[in-house]
Amino acid sequence: MTFAFRDFRSVGWSAAVAALVAGTMVSAAQAQAKDVIKFGAPLPLTGALSPEALKAKQGFEIWMEMVNKAGGIKVGDRKMKVEIAFVDYQSNTPKAVQAAEGLITQEKVDFLFSPHGSGAAKAASNVSEKYKVPTVAATASSTQVFDQKPRYLFGTYTPNETLLAPLFPIAKRDLPSLKKVAIYTRNDLFPLALSQAVEQTAKKNGLDIVFNEKYAITALDHSSALSQLKAAAPDWIFVFGYTNDNLMIRKQMIDQRLEAPLITMLTGPSYPEFVEAAGVAGSENITGASWWDAAVRYTSEDVFGSTEGYIKAFKDKFGIVPDYGHASYTVAAVALQLAIEKAGTTDREKVRDALASLDAKTFFGPIKFNEIGQANSYDPPIFQLRDGKTVVLYPEATKQGDLRLGVK
């Protein structure tokens, strides 16, 4: 008390009061900050992957809005609001790694989401391990991302081989003459992993790979490769890449009148934008797969309550039905939320352990991680585009129709 009184006299009453007020404001701000959980999201908001990043941002935003409307994430006996820091890494993997580190060291986020795609997620996982920050990858399906058994990285996608393998028995049943397969792949981790999975599955099913080529990430002219592919006369064509790749290649296939009884493309046909750009005729009978479709129906223990609840909330906010791109990022956030609530704390180690043992019902499907941190708890839907709409072929629980063959 003596010290305080002497201090007041030396600085003057008004200054002392101002200092006390300022100190109170700082304390209030600190208390308020402790009531917020900050998440970091490095996204390719510009560059080649910007269409995917827009969906990611919307997927995160609907979750954040719904959680905050509900009062926040329940942490023990209190609720904490949610804040997400977004950083654009310009569709450049080295910049994605820098962005992830900056979110931890400069933005001081509590938890992290991986950059888009398997390649960037794997590269940035070293940052999560270095700083021991629990991180959820929304779009990392390649087992190579998890092959070093990272302690702090968890992926909500099942492995690539689960994506298309169920389509092979369907194709062999409906096209008994099926023999020759062609694969054309973007030279990037996720598409290459898809290509390898399909090649292995095709061989197991006694099919011949008559064409298997890679194209550069920056490729714009595919005419020469497609001419060679056409000469191989395949029964089934696989094209792997991202939305813009698929659209460009599909247009050049049409220009060359390149067709087959079966054409499968990933990941473009999973998005409504693919049909809008390719047109109904250009997208007709193309098969694809994704880890979620609006046709699935699950009840859930997350903030949405069910698949229908998620679709309604998203449509109310953005005016469109969400696709798997949106839903993938939302469920990544849901998984982290459920782990925090299970742990009852924001302590990173305890949240990490809660993620490792998570077994939750979500609007996306049941989420549970295997020993290397990758989801292994649901069946991804396979679909075909018809008249500009998605028809689910698999799994049986959400099936809407049978496979329809194109003309060769």
Image (cartoon, grey):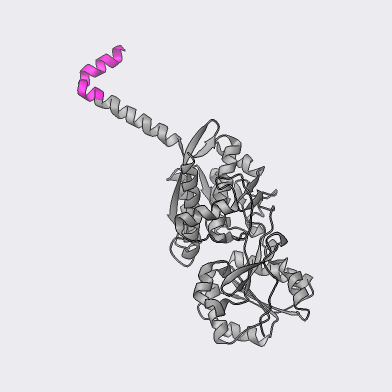
- Residue 321 is situated, as x and y percent measured from the top left of the image, at 52, 61
- Residue 333 is situated, as x and y percent measured from the top left of the image, at 54, 48
Q: Quadrant of residue 194?
A: bottom right
Is residue 350 at least partly visible in the picture? Answer: no
Residue drawn at x 59%, y 53% as measured from the top left: 307
Q: Nearer the viewer, residue 361 or 397?
A: 397
Q: Is residue 138 above or below residue 242?
A: above
- Residue 83 is situated, as x and y percent measured from the top left of the image, at 45, 45
Residue drawn at x 62%, y 43% as measured from the top left: 355
Instruction: State left or right for residue 400 relative to residue 241.
Output: right
- Residue 115 is situated, as x and y percent measured from the top left of the image, at 52, 56
The mark total stands at: 0
Q: What main secondary structure does the magenta stretch of the protein show?
A: helix
Classify the position of the C terminus by image quarter: bottom right
Q: Which residues are magenta?
A: 1-17
Q: Quadrant of residue 359?
A: top right
Residue drawn at x 70%, y 73% as measured from the top left: 403
